[in-house]
């Protein structure tokens, strides 16, 4: 059966439950962002309390709320400027309307930065196998994110292969093998200390031979030497391109949302080392630092594609900007 037929069959089977699953995912998102929402709203309430209009003092206090919510200084200033412009254009905005206005401007900012509003895990028909190279420092949930991605793609009807190219940590290979067994997808690996590019070559070769639809390659998460990291990732990419022209199609940077401003620094390091074109932000369920999603998307001008909201395989979600903002600012 062709992949497109498998995907269509899968859609037909799940269409009747679409609304249920959408509601379930929204509830997971609301729960995952609850700590950030509580933190932002407690601060926002203090700003609004006892005031009848949005003035300069209110905007200054709003700026402080956003910065202390890990939105980041540059993005905060951009948001404040947009809010200030709206207040001036609309002549009078009372503080009760401030939340609505802030919500609209953040949603607009995310839209401008290309954050997608997809409804399912899917890959382009004209890129098979679709190759994703995953990068990020150790401890951010990189391997777990790969396992959850494999689960979601397989659930969508795709034939998935994993490559354990983080050959410097035995735990990384073992963890990926466990995920492969758990999800039911093959994991290509070699002995510890092997050339990561060689693992990538073997993975893509095997994937092509077996008509895989999606290939996800894990890489080492070392940042002690940016030049070495850059050279290693470049070598892996060149080898991939020889086996599957144009690969990797996606370079996914995984960041730990609970680290707040440290995630910004990691993003700077990895975007300097390789051509990252998508982001996954994990561990948002255990932190009040969810504002980092807004700041990183804005500062690095690339889409946040996935967000991690828990330990379960279903808890990796596609990032939907409208639902994210609704969960963050909804009643």
Image: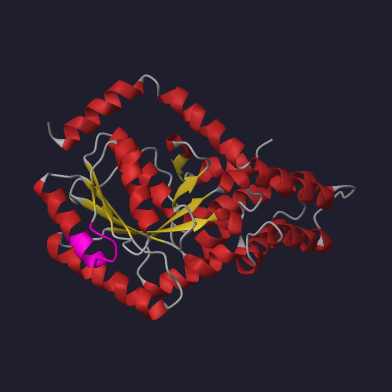
Locate the C terminus by quadrant.
Answer: top right
**Farthest residue in the top direction?**
16
> Is 191 covered by the magenta stretch?
yes
> Does 271 sit above or below residue 225?
above
**Farthest residue in the bottom direction?**
227
> Does 260 sit above or below residue 100?
below
Q: Is residue 195 visible?
A: yes
Q: In the rendered image, which quarter is residue 253 located in?
A: bottom left
Q: How many marks?
A: 0
Locate the N terminus by quadrant.
Answer: top left
**Residue occupying the point 17% across, 31% down:** 5
**Residue 302 picture location, percent across and down:** 43, 61
The boundaries of the magenta stretch are 190-201
**Residue occupying the point 47% across, 44% down:** 320
**Residue occupying the point 53% across, 56% down:** 256
* Figure coloring: secondary structure
Closer to the camera in the image, 75 or 315: 315
**Farthest residue in the left direction?**
209
Q: Is residue 89 left or right of residue 7?
A: right
**Residue 86 picture location, percent across and down:** 67, 57
Q: Is residue 82 left or right of residue 223?
A: right
Q: Is residue 246 visible?
A: no
> Does 151 sit above or below residue 66?
above
Closer to the camera in the image, 325 or 249: 249
**Residue 15 picture location, percent across and down:** 34, 23
Q: In the rendered image, which quarter is residue 184 located in?
A: top left
> Is 2 covered by the magenta stretch?
no
**Residue 200 picture location, percent across and down:** 22, 60
């Amino acid at each position: 059966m062709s992949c497109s037929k498998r995907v269509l069959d899968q859609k037909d089977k799940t269409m009747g439950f679409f609304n249920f699953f959408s509601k379930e995912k929204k509830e997971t998102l609301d729960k995952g962002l609850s700590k950030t929402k509580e933190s932002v709203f407690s601060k926002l309430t203090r700003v609004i309390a006892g005031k009848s209009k949005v003035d300069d003092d209110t905007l200054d206090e709003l700026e402080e709320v956003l910065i202390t919510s890990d939105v980041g200084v540059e993005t905060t200033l951009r948001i404040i400027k947009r809010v200030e412009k709206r207040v001036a254009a609309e002549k009078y905005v009372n503080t009760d309307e401030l939340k609505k206005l802030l919500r609209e401007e953040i949603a607009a900012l995310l839209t401008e930065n290309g954050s997608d509003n997809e409804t399912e895990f899917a890959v382009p028909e004209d890129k098979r196998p679709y190759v994703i190279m995953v990068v990020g420092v150790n401890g951010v949930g990189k391997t777990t994110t790969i396992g959850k991605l494999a689960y979601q793609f397989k659930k969508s009807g795709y034939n998935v292969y994993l490559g354990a190219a983080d050959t410097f940590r035995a735990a990384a290979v073992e963890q990926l093998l466990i995920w492969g067994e758990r999800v039911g997808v093959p994991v290509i690996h070699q002995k510890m200390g092997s050339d990561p590019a060689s693992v990538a070559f073997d993975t893509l070769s095997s994937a092509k031979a077996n008509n895989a639809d999606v290939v996800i390659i894990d890489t080492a998460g070392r940042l002690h030497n940016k030049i070495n990291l850059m050279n290693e990732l470049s070598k892996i990419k060149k080898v991939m391109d020889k086996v599957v022209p144009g690969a990797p199609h996606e370079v996914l940077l995984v960041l730990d949302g609970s680290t707040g401003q440290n995630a910004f620094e990691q993003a700077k390091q990895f975007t300097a080392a390789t051509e990252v074109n998508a982001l996954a932000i994990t561990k948002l369920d255990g932190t009040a630092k969810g504002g980092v999603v807004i700041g990183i998307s804005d500062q690095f001008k690339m889409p946040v594609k996935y967000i991690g909201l828990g330990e379960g395989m279903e808890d990796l979600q596609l990032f939907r900007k409208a639902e994210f903002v609704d969960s963050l600012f909804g009643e």
